[in-house]
Image (cartoon, rainbow, N blue to C red):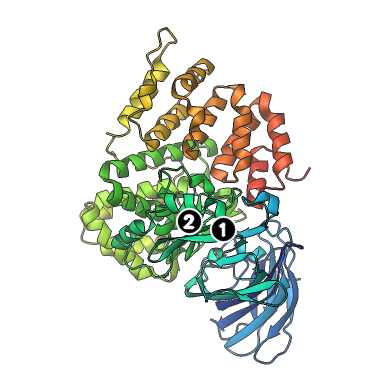
Amino acid sequence: MTENKFSSSDPNSFSNPDEAVVKCIHLSLNVDFNKKILAGFVELEVKKVEDNATELLLDTEDLKINSVIDLRSGNNLEFTFSDPDKIFGTKLAIKLPDNEESNIRILYETSSKASALQWLAAEQTAGGKLPYMFSQCQPIHCRSMLPCQDSPAVKAKYTAVITAPSELRVLMSAIRDGEPIKNSDGTSQHKFHQDVPMPSYLIAIAVGNLESRELGPRSCVWSEPEYVDSAAYEFAETETMLKKAEEVCGPYVWGIYDILLMPPSFPYGGMENPCLTFVTPTLLAGDRSLAGVVAHEISHSWTGNLVTNRNFEHFWLNEGFTMFVERKIIQRMQGEKIHQFSAINGLNDLREAIKVMGADSPLTKLVVNLEGVHPDDAFSSCPYEKGFTFLFYLETQVGGPDVFEPFLKKYLDHYKYQSIDTNDFKKFFLEYFDKNEKSQKVDWDKWLYTPGMPPIIPDYDKSLVLPCTELTNKWIKWDGSNPNPFTEDDLKCFDALQIQEFLAQLLLANSFTLSKVILMQEIYQLNKYKNSEIRFRWLRLCIKARWYDVVPLALEFATKYGRMKFVRPIFRDLGKWEETRDEAIRVFRAHQHQMMNVTAAMVAKDLEISLDV
Ligand code: BES
Ligand code: ZN
């Protein structure tokens, strides 16, 4: 047993990249649906950073390590585990050979409870006939899939050879090496390579009955056959978005940009796995109104995947910048008014998040302290929207997009293939704009280290939000006297984002009565909306107004999908309402084993109950 010391560059990792660093990862794994495990080996190409480094420290979580071999000599290498840490897993220390560079093979298998992996039985898939497995490694779950330096400070290339039942297709966050090769035992081999060095949290795998449709010259969409045509329609703008992103950020270095439409239990809206973005099926609105998530994940190809936060304390460098680039794509495709409207929309999410966390919560700072804190527990809209607001403010301050966009490109080019922290950004900004008077007046400490709402809120163009605010006020001020002043035409000239904004404003308002939501349903038929962002806010508004009739609908929505953005607030709301609390807990218990690990853990927290019964 060795002591648990954290990485010098990352409070959430036990690895030691400042002494010896993993440069390349080769995975060779068998996907075992019976045991729900991945089993095989990983080879790590390790380079000493310090000449006298004696050991390689890796992160693991619930892994079974069978042996460790030095491939040069063929000798076994000594390895020791430290005491498991409840939050961050178990440090694995491997004694290094004397050479400066070594190739180490680790034979291992995952646990059937690996936090990165979700195993779906055939009945849980759209087709109902074949099983499915997928991973979600960000922020720090890769350690449950392979022993690795699970810190975004470390970037490595990877290759993989994956064996799976021949009826299934394997996809990874990498380039496919040809078509699968059939073995004689009913399995096939799928090969991949990722030549761009990337952090461990971007390693991703999905195995299922998957089919593809072409979206553009470098893009396909993949999903179970049942959804592939809807998905192809919904994400048809992918190539246009890629081109706009390249205009803003520079060349796309990852070659392929495919999209995988995930099973309903996928916990996020989207995940920027290189070469293969994962997206939730809650984006299938039928009218492309939620495709902005794809613009977001495309943007990560630069902000996050090329220039990466050194650890998750600087997560805003990933997500704030990505919101900023996402909205630049939206601006180029839909115009300035929609761009600014989307920014206003984001401020609602930020207000809501800060309301839940408390305005003095240290986790509402732009740069957070994650010592002893799991980044999943720190997750919120703050790095996204406070980060966006800061960048929008900086852009305005230095003279607008004409001045800021060339800077952004230069910043991305300067730090590409690296992992950086907020000070690197600050330094680069101040040097680039050293002759720009206003740039030197930015109060960095206030923006970065003060909790609560941003110190300055830009004066966005309100023309698209105004009709929403007017309708909100009309509903709030209406005293219930008859005849009521509302008609179904109120929403006729609103687009999906405006309906969403209208509902978000009502949600932020202090009180809204039961009779009003009932009337609203009668007039606007909001129960019928399929757009998940609209449905989510409408259901929450009804719960807030204590409309008991919608509770079954809300629970159905929150158990059909695993997207935490929707599931968590609904369970939280129902858990806080005395009359629905027991029912919410009962439904959660009945579904928790079908949920992904993170989702179940977070909802248990939101309901203030323990995960195990
Ligand atoms: N990288 C995130 C998802 C993520 C964050 C996974 C932290 C695990 C830990 C992804 O790019 C994201 O931000 N998704 C958003 C999209 C939205 C902001 C457009 C989501 O899931 O809703
Ligand atoms: Zn993101």
Label 2: how many residues lie within 10 Å, few (<14), some (14-19) or many (20+)? many
Residue found farthest to the top: 482
Q: Is mark 2 within 8 Å of ligand 1?
A: yes
Residue with the most extreme right position: 613
Residue 121: x and y in percent read 70, 54
- Image-quadrant location for residue 548: top right
Q: Does the residue tagged 1 have its C-beta within 8 Å of any atom of ligand 1?
A: yes
Name the residue tied to disc 2: 315
- Please provide percent x and percent y for residue 258: 46, 62
Query: Badges 1 and 2: C-beta atoms under 8 Å apart?
Result: yes
For the question of whether residue 434 can be seen, the reply is: yes
In the figure, 560 relative to 208: above or below?
A: above
Q: Is residue 609 visible?
A: no
| Residue 407 marker | none
Q: Position of residue 384 (x, y in %)?
A: 44, 49
At horizontal 59% and vertical 26% (from top left) the residue drawn is 550
Nearer mark to the viewer, of 1 and 2: 1
Packing grade of label 1 (10 A; few <14, some 14-19, many >=20) is many
Q: Nearer the viewer, residue 272 or 69?
A: 272
Q: How many marks?
A: 2
Q: Give the residue pinned by disc 1.
A: 139
Q: Quadrant of residue 74?
A: bottom right
Q: The residue under label 1 is which amino acid type?
A: Pro
- 224 with respect to 119 (left or right): left
Quadrant of the drawing holding the N terminus: bottom right
